[in-house]
Image (cartoon, coloured by chain):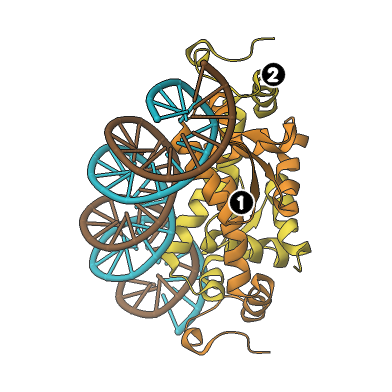
Chain colours: A yellow, B orange, C cyan, D brown
DNA sequence: TCCATACCTGCGCAGGTGCGCAGCTATGCA
DNA sequence: TGCATAGCTGCGCACCTGCGCAGGTATGGA
């Protein structure tokens, strides 16, 4: 079958059928982009440290996260906003303290990968 | 125990002991950064598409990858160089064709996560 | 020997990102 | 009522990154 889009049909290939297999393997561009975005959320040391702390020790306040990671609180706040907008974490307000936790099971799954590692 | 570094000891905390737990949970900064870098390699749609193609259909030539992903060949080449420098992929030269494949088991494991997903 | 081709590299640009500083809002205690 | 604190936001600055274009190198066929 011809999975190669029309605008690339003129380009040379080494193994034409493997190109079709590769296109099928890649799948929908939107799907790929969604996963890339997911990985991007974990690709920053600051955010990853925050997520590891939340994932392994449970709900934590913003100030405590700032002290634990060594970041300034605006940086923590901004990182958490990004993660919250992506549906990875959620915050619960208790008085003037907001405690965050990881609510996305897929992200939690990826974080377990870091845990399991001992290389 | 006092895991809070001296330069942050003066800062206020909500739950002091949970801060120590969080610091222990985060672990070594170098370790966190290594994982962040790992995730960063998968955080670009172009690289992720390349890796998915390589992971699911086996060794592929640069030109074929370019056609399959719709990228220009310098972009593919540069992405593969980055992935090769990180030890994620390796290329084998056959005549004037170079076929790449995924050689890092950890990266392959993360790629399986994308595969399994159907949400 | 000459040419087409598969892949790689230097350079430059446009766009995005993380974070620090200063300042704001809201909550709770005295 | 007044003040200290937890958290959030606007703004601006470096810094990085992906990619396209042009050109270079190596391999194989005519």
Distance of label 2 from label 1 (alpha carbons): 43 Å
Residue B37 placement (x, y as % from top left): 56, 58
| Residue B106: quarter of image | bottom right
* Residue B34 visible in rendering: yes
Residue B2 placement (x, y as % from top left): 63, 89
| Residue A98: quarter of image | bottom right
In front of the other: A34 or A26 = A26
Q: Residue at x 50, y 18 (%)?
A: A11
Quadrant, the C terminus of chain B: top right
Label total for image: 2
In front of the other: A102 or A13 = A13
Give the mark nearest the N terminus, 2 or 1.
2
Q: Residue at x 68, y 77 (%)?
A: B24
In front of the other: B38 or A53 = B38
Q: Residue at x 68, y 22 (%)?
A: A24
Chain bearing mark 1: A
Mark 2 or 1: in front is: 2
Chain bearing mark 2: A
Residue B57 numbered mark, or none: none
Residue D12 placement (x, y as % from top left): 21, 56
User: In what element is the residue under mark 1?
Assistant: strand
Q: Relative to A52, say whether B115 is above or below.
A: above
Crowd class of label 2 (few under 14; some 14 to 19; many from 20; radius 10 Å): some
What residue did someone put label 1 on? Answer: A89
Crowd class of label 1 (few under 14; some 14 to 19; many from 20; radius 10 Å): many
Residue A17 numbered mark, or none: 2
In front of the other: B30 or B9 = B30
Compared across the picture, whether A119 is left or right of A92 comes to right
User: In what element is the residue under mark 2?
Assistant: helix
């Amino acid at each position: 079958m011809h999975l190669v889009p029309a605008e690339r049909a003129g380009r040379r290939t080494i193994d034409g059928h493997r190109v079709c297999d590769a296109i099928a393997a890649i799948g929908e561009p939107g799907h790929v982009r969604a996963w890339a975005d997911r990985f991007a959320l974990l690709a920053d040391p600051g955010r990853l440290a925050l997520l590891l702390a939340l994932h392994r020790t449970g709900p934590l306040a913003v100030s405590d996260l700032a002290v634990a990671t060594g970041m300034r609180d605006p940086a923590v706040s901004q990182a958490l906003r990004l993660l919250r907008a992506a549906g990875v974490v959620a915050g619960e307000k208790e008085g003037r303290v907001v405690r965050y936790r990881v609510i996305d099971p897929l992200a939690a799954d990826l974080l377990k990968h870091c845990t399991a590692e001992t290389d």
